[in-house]
Image (cartoon, rainbow, N blue to C red):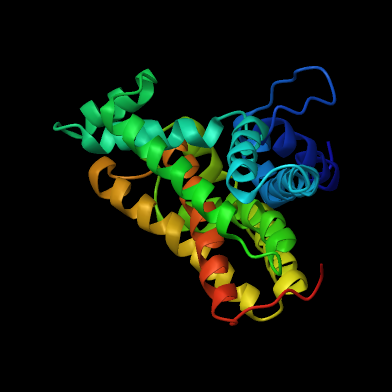
Amino acid sequence: MSALTRTLGGVLIACEFLTPLRLRRVQTYDDRVFAEALGWYPVAGLLIGALLVLADRGLSHLLPPGPTAVLLVALLALASGGLHLDGVADTADGMALQGDRAARLGVMSEGNTGPAGVMALLLVLLAEWAAIAALPDSVRVPSLLLAPLLARWTVVPVGILFRSARPRGLGHAMQQGLWPVAAPLATLIALAAALVLFGAPGLVLMLAAAVGAIVIAGAAARMLDGVTGDVFGAGIEVAQVVVWMSLVAAANKGWIAPLFF
């Protein structure tokens, strides 16, 4: 398989991993090929954002903003297969445990959601609902498109800044696949989308997404001596909320306006 073919094939791998979409029979890949697909994670985020826009256009004619936002949050969870929400719960449970690094990682591997995980999920989902419900019409369509895209790009800064907490697993594989193609490709896609949709202020949104994910990853890395796949997922969910909240605040102050839509 040529490097170009493998890189382009990463689009399907990314979409099949980050969404329930299945365009072919289930396949297995070695860690390197799987990890290199993260260069296309923003594309998977754009597809999810497009789905949200279509649903929002239909629901907004039938329901007020509150119920519409509830259904969009539910659709967002389904469109990502609950993957990142699971990361939120597992990361919160691991960080809340009173124990050493090994014990925290053990709890995160079990997959059983404890009180801290439930609370974290409720807070994230509530924040998503509040942000989506409050998005002004002037920025609503580009906001629904961009936030999922930028959120999935944040695996790049998190992967660059923090080492893996385990010698193997998803987190380790993703970091091994960042270079030489995946990290620049994902960043180029995210940068282009932010600039096309919002111009120069889009760069601030990109920075906000990175900061949101890095803060969560940094807190987890201090306790785990690194990051895991769950932490990457938690960072994605937090970054998504941060972008939407930033857009609500900026639009209400008149600081940002879309170039399209």
For image coordinates 27% across by 27% down, the residue present is: 115
Q: State left or right for residue 187 relative to residue 259.
A: left
Residue 166 appearing in the image: no
Which quadrant would the C terminus be assigned to in this image? bottom right
Q: Residue visible at 30% across and 29% down?
A: 105
* Residue 110 quadrant: top left
**Number of marks present in the image shown:** 0
Left or right for 64, reference 234: right
**Residue 50 position in % (x across, y down):** 78, 48
Q: Position of residue 201 (x, y in %)?
A: 62, 78
Residue 88 location (% of width, % of height): 42, 37
Quadrant of the frame with the N terminus? top right
- 37 horizontally vs 250: left or right: right
Residue at (40%, 37%) from the top-left corner? 122
Q: Residue at x 71, y 69 (%)?
A: 138
| Camera sees residue 176 | yes
Front one among 148 and 7: 148
Q: Position of residue 67 (x, y in %)?
A: 60, 41
Rendered position, 163 above or below 82: below
The residue lying toward the viewer, choosing from 70 and 178, is: 70
Q: Nearer the viewer, residue 120 or 222?
A: 120
Image: 26 above or below 51: above
